[in-house]
Image (tube, helix red, strand yellow):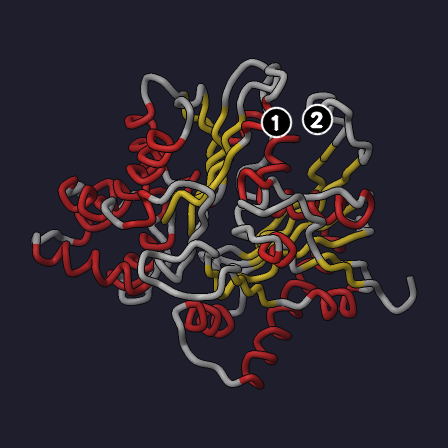
Amino acid sequence: MYVIGLISGTSVDGIDTALVEIEGCDLPSSGFTSNNLKVQLIAARTYPYPTSLREQILGVCEGKPLSMEQLARLDDQIAAQFALAANTIQKEARVSANLIGSHGQTVFHRSPHPPTNSSHLPLGYSLQLGRGELITYLTNIPTVSNFRAADLAAGGEGAPLVSKVDAYLLSHRDRSRCVQNLGGIGNVTYLPPSSQSDWQDRIWGWDTGPANSLLDLAVYRLSEGKLTFDRDGNWAAKGTPDRELVALWLDDEFFHQPPPKSTGRELFGKDYLEKCWQDAKEKQLNAADLLATLTEFTAASIVHSYQNFLPQMPDEVLLCGGGSRNSYLKKLLAQKLAPTSALLTTDRVGLNGDFKEAIAFAVLAHWRFNCSLTGNLVRVTGAAKPMLLGTIHLPIKF
């Protein structure tokens, strides 16, 4: 079966689109160890949003108010762009898809575990725009969307949702691995060696904090809107990180909260950057020093997370996402992980790192639509039980 996975992450860079061929549905009796899932990437591309639409999405993520009519229009505009991405990649690859899995565009995420002295209902809330029923209408392909809702309804974080896919595709018989995604927000899946009899019960995962979110916002501000990210970390590499500031920022309550946990731009967005900006101003840091310090903060927060919450440091750390192309960030991570953990990318072990998340949502859609297979791991999200993830939308003639 050919499945398209679609996602636009918290960086709002564009729509990551992966067309994959997937085989395998039977559940092995011994957990993941006799895995029959086969995934082959046929084509993958990132389709940028129109500039005005991207700016509107970023505004909403930063708390800009919308009327219900404006929200509905934005929901439809995003869905239309996702459908266009799905239709375009089929034409370019000359392959017709049987199914679409669309994560949509997250514009708000609230963890069910609030900060101290905060009060809200016990369930979390997460809003992804780009409604699946419109994607189905515009593509005439069955679409699975709204993946987070079922896990949230069971008391889970609704994130990260890709850990079960990571377990099927990236586990190693003899080595423990951390699969570290570096999107706008970082998330990790810890995979013990699969040769251990109870390894699937010890898979873990959580959001580690900011990856590219603060860096991208800072670059945009420092360049007066001319740049949206620090290509290859070249700007930051010219500076010197202020480790006193990094230690101060790591005092944030989020970093000391044990998993399961999730976060987003609601915490690590413009307001957080403003705090960092003022701290850097007091220290008289220049632009390169600020970016170096923010990059150090990302690397330090990831390793701090491993050291405080993992049973042991992993043998390997596999990077994926846009941040895995940032050489300066990778250098800092490698230094902090040495000598216990080797730093690689998922590309090195056969899974495209730029499109791993899109591939994962194609697999989750396949599991939901064809297999009736639960997609969440309760130890990762904190949900009360495994859940079928996603709402199915069928074309009129199916």
Residue at (66% x, 30% y) in the render: 168
First along the sequence among labels 2 and 1: 2
- 95 or 99: nearer the eye? 99
Residue for point 33% across, 59% down: 217
Question: Dividing the image into 4 quarters, which one contains the C terminus?
Answer: bottom right
Give the structural element (helix, strand or loop) at label 1: helix
Q: Nearer the viewer, residue 93 or 251?
A: 251
> Picture quarter containing residue 292?
top left
The x, y position of residue 71, in whole percent, is 55, 79
- Above or below — where is 354 with respect to 60? above
**Residue 63 placement: quadrant:** bottom left
Res 31 label: 2
- In the rendered image, the residue lying farthest to the right is 397
Secondary structure category for the residue under label 2: loop
Badge 1 density bin: few <14, some 14–19, many ≥20, Cα 10 Å? some
Kindly identify which residue carries mark 1. Answer: 200
The residue at the point 39 percent across, 65 percent down is 119
Q: Position of residue 171 (x, y in %)?
A: 59, 25
Name the amino acid, label 1: Gln
Looking at this view, is 12 or 269 the one in front? 269
Apparent side of residue 284 relative to residue 245 in the rendered image (left or right): left
Asked whether the residues under the numbered discs 2 and 1 touch, taking CB atoms below 8 Å apart as contact, a structural biologist would say yes
